Image (cartoon, rainbow, N blue to C red):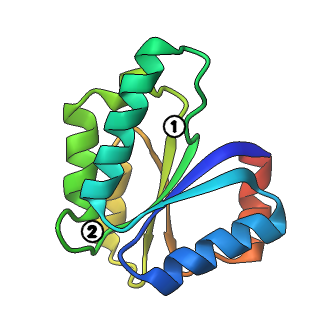
Amino acid sequence: MLDKILCVDDDAITLMLCKKVIERVAFANEVHTAKNGEEAIQYFNNLATKYHNDLNLTYPKLIFLDLNMPIMNGWEFLDNYLQNSYQDLFKEAKFIVLSSTIDPQDVIKAKSYPMVVDFLSKPITKEMLEILKPAF
C-alpha cells in the first residue's frame, strides 16, 4: 500500500470518485487532490520546502494527472514539474496520465516525460487499481 497519492483533475466528481475507489481498494493511506496543474505545483512547492527541512517526509509516489484542465493543464504541469527539478527531489514519484479520450499522439507525448509510467482512460476503476497494485 502506498503512503500518499495525489489526484489532479478539474472535475469534482472525478476527484471524489478517484478518492473513493483508492480508499475502497486500500491502495493508499492518504489521497490528496488538486483541481488543476497550478494547485498541484503549489502542492509540490510546499512539499519541497518541508522536504528540505525533513528528509523523512513522505510524498506521493503516484500521481494521477488529467490533461484537460483550466488554469494550468496537464502538459503545462508536467513541463513545470521538470523545470522545477521536482523529479530530482521526489525521485520515486510516478505519474499516470488520465484522459477521457485516448489520442495516440497524447500517449506518445505523455510517455516522453521520464516520470510518466502509463496513460489510461478515465475514470479510475477498482480493476485498474488491482492491476497497478503489484507495481507499487
Q: Earlier in the sequence, mark 2 or mark 1?
A: 1
Helix, strand or loop at mark 2: helix
Q: Which mark is residue 105?
A: 2
Percent from the top left, x then y, of residue 33? 49, 61
Q: Which mark is residue 93?
A: 1
Please name the amino acid that badge 1 sits on: Ala
In the rendered image, the vertical position of residue 26 relative to residue 66, given as above or below: above
In the rendered image, the vertical position of residue 1 relative to residue 49, given as above or below: below
Report how far apart the C-alphas of labels 2 and 1 lie in the structure: 24 Å
Q: Residue at x 52, y 74 (%)?
A: 15
Percent from the top left, x then y, of residue 122? 51, 80
Res 74 quadrant in image: bottom left
Give the camera-side residue of 40 and 91: 40
Is residue 20 at least partly visible in the picture?
Answer: yes
Please name the amino acid that badge 2 sits on: Gln
Give the camera-side residue of 77 and 117: 77
Percent from the top left, x then y, of residue 131? 76, 62
Which of the two marks, 2 or 1, is nearer to us in this view? 1
In the rendered image, the vertical position of residue 126 relative to residue 76, given as above or below: below
Horizontal side of 127 relative to 53 (left or right) equals: right
Q: Residue at x 38, y 84 (%)?
A: 101
